[in-house]
Image (tube, helix red, strand yellow):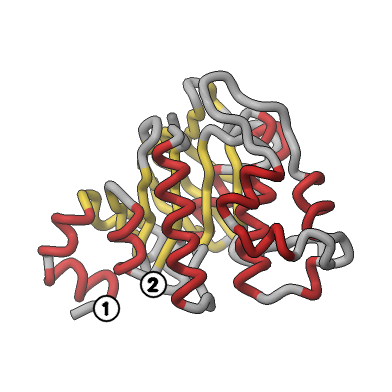
Amino acid sequence: MLEVRALCAWYGRAQALHDVSLSVASAESVVLLGRNGAGKSTTLKAICGMLRPVQGEVYFAGQRIDALASWRIARLGLGYVPEERRIFTDLTVIENLQVGRQPGRAGLPQWTFERVVALFPNLGELAHRRGGEISGGEQQMLSIARTLMGNPTTILLDEPTEGLAPVIVDQVAEALRELKRDGVSVLLSEQNFRFAEQVADRAYVIEGGQLRYPGTLVALARDATARAQYLGLD
């Protein structure tokens, strides 16, 4: 569903990514693990066209997309949930969701307001509250739900659990598991290894803008040396 080949990216003259290659299959959940500043967010932004210039190739559903504008990539069905959430604070919850609406995709269940509210019940109770008046955890739910209203076949999530209370983290985890059951592919960046174990099939570890470790979460959990070296975990 998503294939990245030898991706390089720069911030000004500083190279941020060095030949990053990864893949996500249909209905697979993959996590990009790493410390702060390792290149996780940069990778997601380069994939979805939010960061230029880049070198390398990105293929989505068999189509090369690395030369496309970010809005064209989104219309193809590649959703992106930024770390900063970037909801419209002056719009209500339901208005935020309507902004993200796109037609359904063949072979996947269609996301509607009723369906995202079933996934995140808090949003239903806050439907007419302005985005700037809800909590950080509720804003994260809204950011994910707004992306789902675009009916993506693949979704990129940047640090979805950062700063969230444990009960909200559990809701996000269940939402990601439901997406996978529905056939949606997921690529997320994370520092929370325990959360990653709950939702991901495979992991890539990134450090200094380079991939250091590809493998299953089970294998990484058993590799104490890799976890200590690249993630600072005992």
On the image, the x and y values in percent for residue 216 come to 21, 50
On the image, the x and y values in percent for residue 52 come to 64, 47
Residue that appears at 60% across and 42% down: 79
Q: Quadrant of the N terminus?
A: top left
Residue that appears at 66% across and 57% down: 143
For the residue pair 124 and 199, the one nearer the viewer reads as 124
Whole-Å distance between the Cαs marked 1 and 2? 8 Å
Whether residue 101 can be seen here: yes
Q: Which secondary structure lies at badge 2?
A: loop
Q: Earlier in the sequence, mark 1 or mark 2?
A: 2
Mark 1 sits on what residue? 232
Labels 1 and 2 touching (C-beta < 8 A)? yes
Q: Amino acid at mark 2?
A: Arg
Q: Amino acid at mark 1?
A: Gly
Q: Which secondary structure lies at badge 1?
A: loop
Question: Mark 1, residues whose alpha carbon is within 10 Å: few (<14), some, or many (≥20)?
Answer: few
Give the quadrant of residue 68.
Answer: top right
Relative to 117, 162 lies left or right: left
Compared to 41, does 48 lie above or below? above
Q: Residue furthest right?
A: 90
Mark 2 sits on what residue? 35
